[in-house]
């Protein structure tokens, strides 16, 4: 109800803006016809008319953007609320069961394991919100060191594979045009690990039940390194290829209505890539055709290579 109400508001403001512009045009044209001999008045009338039209257009754009931003904010609040309340309710239920009933040791261990997973989910949601705030802060993350990016990507791939209990063939990793010393970049290892993990996590979430992901790291040229994560999932409509990196934006396919998330993951990825002098973007041939998420970063020579020179 709330979303449809906001859409109605957006339509109202658009129609109002168009009506005001049409009225202003009619009045100005009528005024020009009646006073065409008055050159000075005509000149100032045209200027006033242009300013009036510009003001109404800017006002309408501002109102529509504010309504959309409010809608995105509410969607984010709903998503975060769900991500917080669900594991809390699960933990409470298991604790009450343990308190009221005598359970076998195996059953207790199962409950402990489930509660730990819920606690991890809570922690991840909180950290994601904190990362988003940090990503929006231009002063944060200025401390940069040499990072073995190839090793970092391998570690993230192994960690994600373990986390989701995936077979090696479901999440494959390969390196191309990379020498034995690996690929090094200059930046924050923590931020880069967050970006890579978010891209991998996003690919798995939107793959559905059949996870088939190809992770490829390559030196695109002498100055840049490219990480591409290709999935065979739901794909992305061309109109959404840039929107998915906006704060709070989430795809909402009916087939994956239960996909968890806050709409901050890819926003964080793009922010981190930009802070490191790189870029993040998405490629897709359309819905149902899979997606490739790409991170490009400027590379540097490994410390040993610099010494050798």
Image: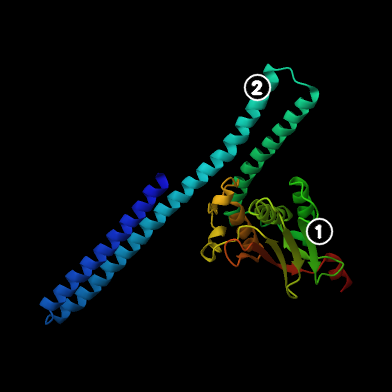
Q: CA distance from mark 1 to mark 2?
A: 44 Å
Q: Choose mark 1 or mark 2, whichever is in front.
A: 2
- Where residue 174 appears, as percent x and y from the top left, is 80, 64
Q: Residue at x 78, y 64 (%)?
A: 184
Residue designated by label 1? 151
The reply, left or right, for residue 214 in relation to residue 4 is right
Q: Residue at x 57, y 51 (%)?
A: 255
Q: Secondary structure at mark 1?
A: helix
Residue designated by label 2? 96
Pick the front one: 1 or 66? 1
Pick the front one: 138 or 162? 162
Query: Which numbered disc flags the more N-terminal residue, 1 or 2?
Result: 2
Task: Give residue 29's quadrant in the image.
Answer: bottom left
Number of callouts? 2
Q: Residue at x 51, y 42 (%)?
A: 78
Pick the front one: 3 or 24? 3
């Amino acid at each position: 109800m709330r979303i449809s109400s906001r859409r109605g508001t957006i339509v109202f403001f658009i129609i109002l803006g168009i009506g005001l512009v049409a009225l202003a045009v009619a009045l100005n044209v009528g005024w020009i016809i009646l006073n065409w001999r008055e050159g000075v008045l005509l000149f100032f009338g045209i200027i006033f008319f242009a300013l009036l039209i510009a003001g109404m257009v800017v006002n309408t754009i501002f109102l529509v953007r504010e309504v959309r931003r409010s809608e995105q904010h509410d969607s984010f609040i709903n998503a975060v609320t769900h991500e917080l309340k669900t594991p809390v309710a699960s933990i409470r239920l298991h604790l009450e069961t343990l308190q009221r009933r005598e359970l076998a040791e195996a059953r207790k261990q199962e409950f402990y394991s489930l509660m730990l997973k819920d606690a991890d989910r809570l922690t991840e949601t909180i950290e994601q919100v904190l990362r988003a705030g940090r990503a929006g802060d231009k002063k944060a993350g200025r401390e940069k060191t040499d990072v073995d990016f190839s090793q970092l990507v391998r570690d993230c791939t192994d960690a994600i594979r373990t986390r989701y209990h995936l077979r090696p063939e479901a999440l494959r990793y390969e390196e191309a045009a990379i020498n034995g010393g690996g690929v090094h970049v200059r930046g924050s290892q923590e931020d880069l690990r967050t970006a890579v993990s978010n891209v991998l996590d996003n690919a798995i979430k939107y793959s559905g039940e059949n996870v088939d992901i190809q992770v490829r790291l390559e030196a695109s040229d002498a100055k840049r390194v490219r990480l591409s994560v290709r999935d065979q999932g739901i794909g992305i409509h061309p109109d959404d290829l840039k929107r998915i990196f906006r704060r709070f934006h989430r795809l909402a396919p009916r087939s994956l209505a239960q996909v968890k998330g806050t709409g901050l993951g890819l926003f964080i990825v793009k922010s981190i890539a930009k802070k490191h002098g790189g870029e993040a973007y998405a490629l897709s041939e359309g819905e149902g055709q899979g997606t490739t998420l790409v991170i490009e970063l400027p590379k540097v020579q490994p410390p040993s290579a610099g010494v050798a020179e």
